Structure formats: C-alpha cells, structure tokens
C-alpha cells in the first residue's frame, strides 16, 4: 500500500518521500527514497523528515517486537527448545506528535482481525492521528500479500467505507481524500 500511495500522490503532483524497509517492489520514479532495515532505523529517518513534510502517512507493517539480544555468531543447536526474549520496538506513529511535535496531517493504518472500527478509533485518539485507514486482515484475498484491499477510513467525525478494489485504485481514492482533508485542516489552522 505504501508504494501504491507514493505513486498516487505523485500523480496528484505532490513531492513524495518514501521511507521503506526491504521489499522486492520497484522504487517509483521521482520519489525521494530512504531505505531502512530496522524499526529503529525507520524511526530515526522519520524523525529527521517530519519537520519537512505537510502530510505523513504511516503504513509500514513494522514489527512490534524485536530480539533483545542479537547473536554475533550462528546460534549452535543444543537443547530441544530455545527461548528468545523479545522487547517492544519504538512506536514510530505514536511518537510523531507526542515526541516529535508533528503539526501536519497525520495518517496511520490499522490491520485488525476483529472490532475494526473500535480498534481504529482507539488508535485515532491514542496516537493523535487525523485519520486511520483500517483493514480487516482476517478476510481472504485482501491486505497482506495481495494486490487487492478494502478499507474503512476512520476520522473523528465520520467513517468512509471504500469497497474491495485494486490497491492502485484504492490508493488513488485515498490520496484524493487525504489531500482534501489536509487542505481543510490547513485552512482552519
Ligand atoms: O498499534 P498498531 O501497531 O496496530 O498501529 C499500526 C500503525 O502504527 C500503522 O500505521 C503502522 O505503520 C504504525 N506502527 C509504527 N511503529 C511500530 C508499529 C506500527 O509506526 N512499531
């Protein structure tokens, strides 16, 4: 979705910065591109970029936990079971306003398997977003590893359901809605 959105915003004549973990996708022409490996790298790149952007969209599926200790060498087989201790990764979206003081239009994504709207509303207020784009990842054929998606756009005052469509068409529709809302917010500021 991130790559589809980057292309959709380019078509709307926006200047786009794409910060991405490793993928096999082609980097769209005309975007500024920052490759990152870890959640911490992504956080650091986002923190440096936030003061330069009007709209920030967070749709990377960042791992919530990471190994506490990274072995310098291959872990040799010994006991029958092995326990890895995981620690929480930095919440990049959650830090945008609360720590980095981002004032622009803030959009997060929510991949849920139940209570789609409720969980999205919790994220909207908890992470001080203007919009959450939620999708139900328990449904076959949409979301992760699929070319199609179906989303519920949740804002403070309203919900907008965008029915199942190609990620490319959805991205185009989402970009139009975000640009319109961001302009509204800007004119009211
Ligand atoms: O709370 P949850 O992880 O479900 O929220 C999903 C949103 O948070 C997405 O926009 C995702 O890109 C972002 N996220 C983040 N940092 C993390 C995990 C998720 O910014 N460590």
Image (tube, rainbow, N blue to C red):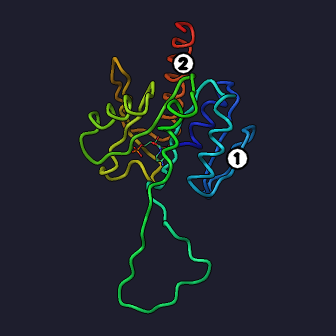
Q: Is residue 69 above or below residue 25?
A: below
**Image coords of residue 76 (percent x, y):** 51, 89
Which residue is identified by label 1? 34
Side (left or right) of 82 relative to 186: left
Residue at horizontal 33 percent and vertical 24 percent from the top: 159
Which quadrant of the figure contains the C terminus?
top right
Side (left or right) of 25 relative to 87: right
Count of residue discs: 2
Dot 1: element: strand
First in sequence, mark 2 or 1: give its number. Answer: 1
**Image coords of residue 181 (percent x, y):** 50, 17
Residue at horizontal 39 percent and vertical 81 percent from the top: 82
Q: Nearer the viewer, residue 182 or 144?
A: 182
In which quadrant of this rendering is ligand 1 seen? top left
Dot 2: element: helix
**Image coords of residue 149 (percent x, y):** 41, 42
Q: Is residue 92 above or below residue 160?
A: below
Which residue is identified by label 2? 182
């Amino acid at each position: 979705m991130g790559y589809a959105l980057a292309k959709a915003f380019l078509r709307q004549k926006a200047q786009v910065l794409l910060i991405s973990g490793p993928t096999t996708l082609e980097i769209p022409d005309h975007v500024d591109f920052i490759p990152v490996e870890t959640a911490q790298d992504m956080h650091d790149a986002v923190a440096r970029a936030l003061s330069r952007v009007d709209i920030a969209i967070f749709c990377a599926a960042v791992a919530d936990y990471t190994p506490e200790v990274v072995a310098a060498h291959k872990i040799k087989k010994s006991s029958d079971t092995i326990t890895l201790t995981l620690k929480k990764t930095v919440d990049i979206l959650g830090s945008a306003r609360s720590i980095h003081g981002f004032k622009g239009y803030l959009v997060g994504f929510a991949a849920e398997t139940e209570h789609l709207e409720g969980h999205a509303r919790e994220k909207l207020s908890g992470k001080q977003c203007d919009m959450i784009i939620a999708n139900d990842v328990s449904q076959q054929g949409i979301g992760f590893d699929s070319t199609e998606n179906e989303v519920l756009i949740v804002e403070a005052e309203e919900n907008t359901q965008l029915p199942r469509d190609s990620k490319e068409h959805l991205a185009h529709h989402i970009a139009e809605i975000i640009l319109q809302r961001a302009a509204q917010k800007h004119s009211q500021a």
